[in-house]
């Protein structure tokens, strides 16, 4: 799965007037995007069992695990907004008491933070699911033909044309290290330093030091409920490391990168001898 586009915004502790973004896709953002692709309505976006006691479809998404490779970290962008200024009183910003802001108080300043021109390649696994392949393939099919339009953290941030890159990989995490092309220019040396983040400890064979597999921070992005007026999250550990990968994985931008990606997804087969 590849997440890229002109703008992304992955809020973790946003308030009304200050909408932040962390440096990579969050669990809540990715699970919410998959839930939208599957057509799960807001009133059903609750972790836990369904009416019959079995795990709900949204609850099953909590079994997904995301390992994120930072192909391009992008540039942080801050957008300055004003809301409610210059409007008549009956159209100004509502107050908590059901009224409207009065003269001299109609304008609210809001700041929105984004990642510009960032690209992340994500290995999606479900090691704790009863049928990991069935769950991940169902999610991949939904992302390829989503029920509702998708967005990268905010509705103003549509994804690029390519979202699902490969399905049924025997080891998706290993593919991030050895196979999947990286969307950045090739460096002059034999290797390139690439950052990874994950929501579970990196596997033992991951080329990282023991210290880098320790928890580096906590993020408040594990969705409990994503209902329209009742969104609840809980904290979870976040892991990060930086690895040296072969420089040959880097294939630049634009059509050069797309050609490399197509070659990776559809390797050439030997031409049959018809003579």
Image (tube, helix red, strand yellow):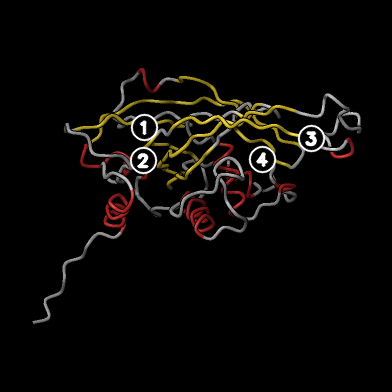
199 shown above or below 175: above
Q: Which residue is mark 2?
A: 173
The residue at the far top in this view is 211
Q: Which residue is mark 4?
A: 47
The Cα atoms of the two marked residues, 2 and 4, are separated by 26 Å
Residue nearest the observer in this picture, 194 or 128: 194
Q: Secondary structure at mark 4?
A: loop
The residue at the far left in this view is 275
Q: Are marks 2 and 1 in contact (CB under 8 Å)?
A: yes
Q: In this image, 116 relative to 43: left or right?
A: left
The Cα atoms of the two marked residues, 4 and 3, are separated by 43 Å
Q: Which callout, 4 or 3, points to the residue nearer the camera?
A: 3
Comes first in the chain, label 1 or label 4: 4
The Cα atoms of the two marked residues, 1 and 3, are separated by 56 Å
Q: Which mark is residue 203?
A: 1
Comes first in the chain, label 2 or label 3: 3
Q: Secondary structure at mark 2?
A: helix
Q: Position of residue 145 (x, y in %)?
A: 53, 61
243 shown above or below 226: above
Q: Based on the displayed image, in which of its 4 quarters is residue 242 positioned? A: top left
Q: Are marks 1 and 4 in contact (CB under 8 Å)?
A: no
Q: Which residue is mark 3?
A: 86
């Amino acid at each position: 799965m590849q997440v890229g586009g002109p703008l992304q915004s992955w809020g973790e502790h946003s308030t009304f007037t200050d909408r932040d973004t962390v440096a990579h896709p969050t669990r809540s953002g990715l699970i919410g995007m998959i839930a939208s692709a599957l057509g799960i309505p807001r009133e059903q976006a609750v972790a836990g069992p369904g009416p019959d006691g079995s795990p709900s479809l949204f609850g099953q998404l909590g079994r997904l695990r995301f390992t994120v490779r930072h192909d391009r970290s992008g540039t942080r962008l801050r957008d300055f907004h004003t809301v409610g200024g210059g409007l008549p009183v009956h159209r100004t910003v509502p107050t908590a008491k059901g009224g409207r802001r009065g003269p001299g108080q109609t304008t609210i300043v809001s700041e929105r933070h984004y990642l510009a021109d960032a690209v992340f390649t994500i290995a999606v696994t479900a090691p704790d699911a009863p049928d990991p392949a069935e769950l991940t393939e169902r999610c991949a099919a939904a992302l390829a033909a989503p029920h509702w339009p998708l967005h990268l953290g905010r509705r103003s941030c549509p994804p690029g044309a390519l979202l699902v890159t490969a399905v049924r990989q025997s080891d998706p995490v290993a593919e991030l290290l050895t196979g999947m092309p990286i969307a950045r220019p090739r460096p002059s040396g034999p290797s390139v330093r690439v950052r990874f983040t994950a929501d579970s400890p990196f596997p033992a064979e991951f080329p990282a030091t023991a210290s880098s597999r320790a928890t580096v921070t906590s993020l408040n992005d594990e969705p409990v409920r994503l209902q329209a007026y009742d969104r609840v999250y809980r904290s979870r550990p976040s892991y990060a490391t930086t690895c040296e990968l072969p420089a040959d994985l880097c294939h630049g931008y634009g059509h050069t990168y797309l050609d490399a990606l197509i070659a990776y997804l559809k390797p050439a087969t030997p031409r049959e001898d018809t003579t």
